[in-house]
Amino acid sequence: MLQSPHQPLQVAAVPAQRTPAREDDAGPWHSEAACRRDEAGLFFAPSKEPTAARLAREEAAKRVCGGCPVMIECREHALMQPEPYGVWGGLTAAERRVALARRRRRDIELTATTTAERIAAAG
């Protein structure tokens, strides 16, 4: 999602200087985002939202993301920032935390494997 509940309804929540992720894009990745047509409230929780309402809202937001041509670019943006709130690239904030933890674990395992291979090759 492009807009934060703490900012005016503008694209300003996403860096304008980002280069297009796809070669055929004429503009920044977020210019093609499906969520640009939807209300920010669908992607960000109101304060004290009941659990059932939150789950329903998040599923509706994920359906919008599912048909988005730049879902992967949006997800990567949210993971790299990291965006602490809202549904971005089809993932909630909690799902993004899990994805980041898995990436960190994978990176540690890859580093350990590479180090072990270097030691074995040298020895």
Image: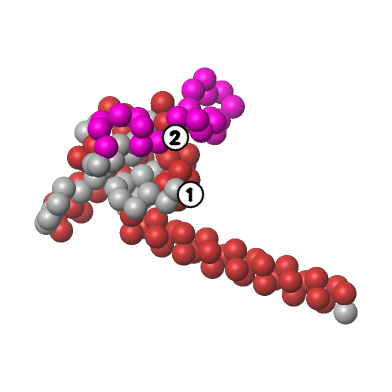
In this rendering, is residue 99 above or below 26? Answer: below
The N terminus: image quadrant: top left
Query: Element type at marker 2?
Result: loop
Occupied quadrant, residue 109:
bottom right
**Depicted 106 relative to depicted 27: above or below:** below
Question: Mark 1 highlights which residue?
Answer: 80
Res 119 → quadrant: bottom right
Question: In the rendered image, is residue 64 in sight?
Answer: no
Figure colour scheme: secondary structure
Crowdedness near tag 2: few (<14), some (14–19) or many (≥20) residues, C-alpha within 10 Å: few
Q: What's the magenta bit mostly, secondary-structure-wise?
A: loop
- Which residue is outermost to the bottom? 123
Q: Nearer the viewer, residue 33 or 18?
A: 18
**Residue in the image at 40% along x and 36% along y:** 14
Residue farthest to the front, as pictured: 7
Q: Residue at x 48, y 27 (%)?
A: 28
Query: 66 and 110: which one is in front?
Result: 110
Q: Which residue is mark 2?
A: 15
Question: Which residues fall within the magenta stretch?
Answer: 7-28
Residue 117: percent from the left, percent from the top?
78, 71
Would you say residue 34 sits in the magenta stretch? no
Residues packed near mark 1 inside 10 Å, few (<14), some (14 to 19) or many (20 plus): few
